[in-house]
Amino acid sequence: MTDPRPDDSAFVVVPRRPGERLRRAALWLGWPLSLLLLALWMQHRAGPGAVALRAEHAELQERHAALAAELEEHKQQTATLARSDQISRAANLDLQQTLAERDAEIAALRADVQFFERLVGATGQRRGLGVHEARFHPEAGGSWRYTLTLTQNLNRGAITRGRMRFAVEGVIAGELATLDWERLRQAPGDPGQDYAFRYFQTLEGSIVLPADFTPQRVRVTLDGGGNAVESTLPWAAAPD
């Protein structure tokens, strides 16, 4: 029968050396100390370079701030120039519009002067009472503003008096129709518009046309006290 106890010859007793604990302590203390010394040595070697880098970094920051301020100033100048250019363009457009309006006024005045010279000049053709022009301008609410110019230079120096009425001829619902003065003025019994002038006069007023009525001609009657004159002109609608 085999003995279960272990064999004492399998265990070996090794005696501890006296300096082993000291060597281990030196290793544990020497490793961090060597790292610290290495770091101090590297910091000492890199000291002048780090100072230069910090100085260069500060200089770059100053340059960046200066460039940013310069860029902001340029942006403000650009915005000011753009605004000034916009104002100049608007002023130029306004000036051009004003000049165009003045040119139109001058042209109208020249036409009026030429018309007056032909009417009262020594070489002007003598004409009796008549309608020189009839214009119609659309108004709000569907009404029309009329402007009629009456002329005469046959009786120079004399005052021509009377009443003006007109009718508008056109098409409504596909058929010819005539709207008389009372219907146009929406005033039953209206005798007409008085006129009194030496050479010419402009008469103005408002009329109302049906919405489905298309005007074509204007028939004007000038009644000077039993001596009526009738003129027919095409419908001339001026732009609104």
Image: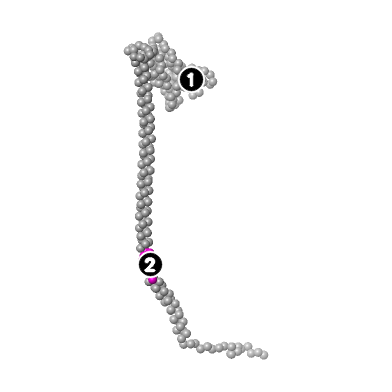
Q: Horizontal and vertical percent for residue 62? A: 35, 58
Q: Which residue is mark 1?
A: 216
Asked if one can make out residue 192 in the rendered structure from this viewpoint, the answer is: no
Give residue 81's position: percent from left, percent from top: 36, 44
Is 28 situated above or below 231? below
Residue at disc 2, secondary structure: helix
Q: Is residue 113 magenta?
A: no
Which quarter of the picture shows residue 156? top left
Report the colour scheme.
one colour
Task: Tell me: 27 left or right of 88.
Answer: right
Q: Is residue 53 magenta?
A: yes
| Amino acid type, mark 1 | Gln
The three-letter code of the residue at mark 2 reads: Gly
- Residue at the image position 37 percent from the left and 69 percent from the top: 47
Magenta: main secondary structure equals helix
Q: Is residue 78 above or below residue 99?
A: below
Asked if labels 2 and 1 touch by Cβ distance under 8 angstroms, the answer is: no
162 and 239: which is toward the camera: 239
Q: Which residues, given as a range, are shown in magenta?
A: 45-54
Label 1 Cα crowd, 10 Å radius (few <14 / some 14-19 / many 20+): some
Between 72 and 166, the one nearer to me in the picture? 72
Name the spot of residue 194 as percent of width and height, x first. 37, 16
Q: Which quadrant of the structure image shows residue 59? A: bottom left
The residue to which callout 2 is attached is 49
Q: Which residue corresponds to the image point at 36% horizontal and 39% vertical from the top-left?
A: 88
SS class, disc 1: strand
Whether residue 1 appears in this view of the structure is yes
The disc, 1 or 2, on the residue closer to the chain's N-terminal end is: 2
Q: CA distance from mark 1 to mark 2?
A: 99 Å
Give the residue displayed 45% in from the left and 17% down from the top: 233
